[in-house]
Amino acid sequence: MGERVLEVSNLTTVFHTKKGTFPAVYGIDFTLDAGETLAIVGESGCGKSVTSLSVMHLLPDRIGEVAAGSSVKFKGTEISGYSNKQMSKLRGDEISMVFQDSLTSLNPTMTVMEQMVEPFMVHRGMKRREAEKSAVEMLRKVGIPNPEIRARQYPHQFSGGMRQRVIIAMALSCNPSVLICDEPTTALDVTIQAQILKMIYDLKKEMNTAVILITHDMGVVAETADRVLVMYGGQGVEQADCETLFTNPLHPYTQGLLASIPKIDDDTRLSTIEGMVPGLGNMPAGCHFCDRCPYCTERCREENPPMYQVEGREVRCFRYEEKDERRTV
Amino acid sequence: MKKILEVKNLTKTFQVNGGFLKKGKNLTAVDNVSFELMEGETLCLVGESGCGKSTLGRSILQIIKPTSGEVLFDGVDLCKLDEKKVRPYRKNLQMIFQDPYASLNPRMTIRELIGAPVRAFKLAASAEEFDKKIREVCSVVGISEDWLDKYPHEFSGGQRQRIVIARALILNPKFIVCDEPVSALDVSIRSQVLNLMKDLQAQFRFSYLFVSHDLSVVNYIGDRIAVMYLGEFVELADKRELFRNPLHPYTQALLSAIPVADVTYKRERNYLEGEVPSPVDPPSGCKFRTRCKYAADICRQQKPQFVMVSEEHYAACHMQHCV
């Protein structure tokens, strides 16, 4: 793998609500190397999107804030304390983001071209004509037919898959080091999803971009990711490379999650994870998964396990305490 | 096994882009679809968005009046009946929608919501009988009784879908159309709801028409699978047969496009080029030919027939011999 581009440690984000202040993300740690794809998976409300928004400084101030002690290092520089102005220079240039909903990500009153030239003019200081040329080139790269003509059209004239291509073109136009994709294909049909995922993969290879893929779909993870971070209740519960995670999941939540996915070639009864994801306000005091865990003990209810390092991977569960490699005997 | 439903040449055409004095275009959402459904069977409809799977489900229940064709339920053609005469049949025909948030009236308690069909058909003579019916269905679906006086906003998506299922079951229907019932749910909750739906079917022997875009869900819940493309059935077969031996190029592409949550699963990827053409102006002949890699001249000139290829396996493709 290449150079380390992103290092997030102890990232904690709190939300201010009417009922009080609750942490939505608790002490997330992960790293990202150039050319690598890290998938962050979890169910709705587990904090996967909040994690990425915190890295990008995109959380509205009144709603949430990144707590003190969190560290986000981009190419060795601490960016968690950056001002909005400093972040603006970074966003869209070095780190860019693709969101789920392609319709709301584009401005409906501007043609695609007017929106496409922005990153080139703002970050690269190009003149309009030059920027237009590069924009058309980018659109061709993401597989939009007749880019010269299509660029003069408005977003509503594009289909969902085509709009998502435009957004990816825009995100990649300044050749960023990190591309964060937040559920990029969730709103699309499977055949279009396959096209888009392949395109992201090809472009990533070509440009050596590091990709953070946020998704709830384990199928997408299995096919695209190099490493996987599984989140539950605002915490990372397991981190491993893709193959190990799918063949030998350690955390009871990951095991339950994988077992509850219907298989394409097997219709034996699905196992389920009983109960529901706890809300932000009533997270259990101990391990966040304890209420739904088949192996739950007294200790799990009282104490939140740390991330243990086991066989080159990380897992947050007391069952692996003895195997922890950092443990002092 | 008893045949419970027979759909013959069902077609639904919508007028679009029309206006006062302006003639609109016709959009054929469901095009000449025929199938049969047995008691206790699950037929799944799969296809991309806009292929007409939801419209088909709704036309069968007469929520949308079909343009032509027949829907025979217990030997009676529902399409010929007006709204008043269909009403008694609605006891046997129920529907579960995708969005459990929009399906429940936020101003009604769970008791009122689940009991609404009983009240609508005046099936409970007294308050005790009403209560008894609700309690019965709640124990079947796994709703605890202290939910009954709460309001929908107090429940999560999976719990709400349970409430919707309870409401659909309270009249003991024979046929339920499920329109993407688990698409809005999280993985761990989805498996709970799927298992519940399967258990209930085994217990009460009703039939499902299960609309979904997710092939792995379909494989879990279904018996037979129908693949739709631009309003037409392109393939219909037993699920094992369909997954093992897909004949239509569209089915093959669809199967190869699903992401599989298994790193050891190896296969040849078969990427489908382009996007679904507009249903207002579909291609001539075979509707799939614009995206099909086997397309030949005959595909442009002639519409392929939906024929039986092997036992209980139907497909509509000119090229199936060489595929």
Image (cartoon, coloured by chain):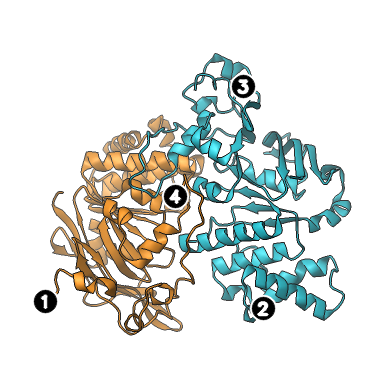
Chain colours: A orange, B cyan
Residue lying furthest left: A329
Amino acid type shown at disc 1: Thr
Of B49 and B179, which appears nearest the observer? B179
* Disc marking residue A328: 1
Residues flagged by tags 1 and 2 on a common chain: no
What residue lies at 59% left-to-right and 47% top-to-bottom? Answer: B222
Check whether the beta carbons of the residues at disc 3 and disc 4 lie within 8 A of each other. no
Name which of mark 1 and mark 4 comes first in the sequence: 4
Which amino acid type is marked by label 4? Ser
Tell me if residue B299 comes above or below residue B264 in the rendering: above
* Amino acid bearing label 3: Gly
**Helix or strand or loop: what does disc 2 sit on?**
loop
Q: In which image quadrant can residue B172 be found?
A: bottom right
Of tags 3 and 4, the one toward the viewer is 3
Label 1 neighbour load within 10 Å: few <14, some 14-19, many 20+:
few
| Distance from Cα at disc 3 to Cα at disc 2 | 54 Å
The image shows residue A187, relative to residue A59, as above or below, that is: above
- Asked whether, in this view, residue B279 is left or right of residue B168, the answer is left
Helix or strand or loop: what does disc 3 sit on? loop
Question: Could one spot residue A179 in this view of the protein?
Answer: no
Provide the secondary structure element on which disc 1 rests: loop
Q: For mark 2, what is the residue?
A: B148
Q: Position of residue A265 (x, y in %)?
A: 47, 44
Residue at image mark 3: B285
Name the subunit of mark 4.
A
Residue matched to label 4: A102
In the image, what residue type sits under mark 2? Leu
Mark 3 to mark 1 CA distance (whole Å): 73 Å
- Give the image location of residue A224, x and y in percent: 32, 47
Is circle 1 on the same chain as circle 4? yes
Left or right of residue A309, residue B39 in this image: right
Q: Mark 4, residues whose alpha carbon is within 10 Å: few (<14), some, or many (≥20)?
A: many
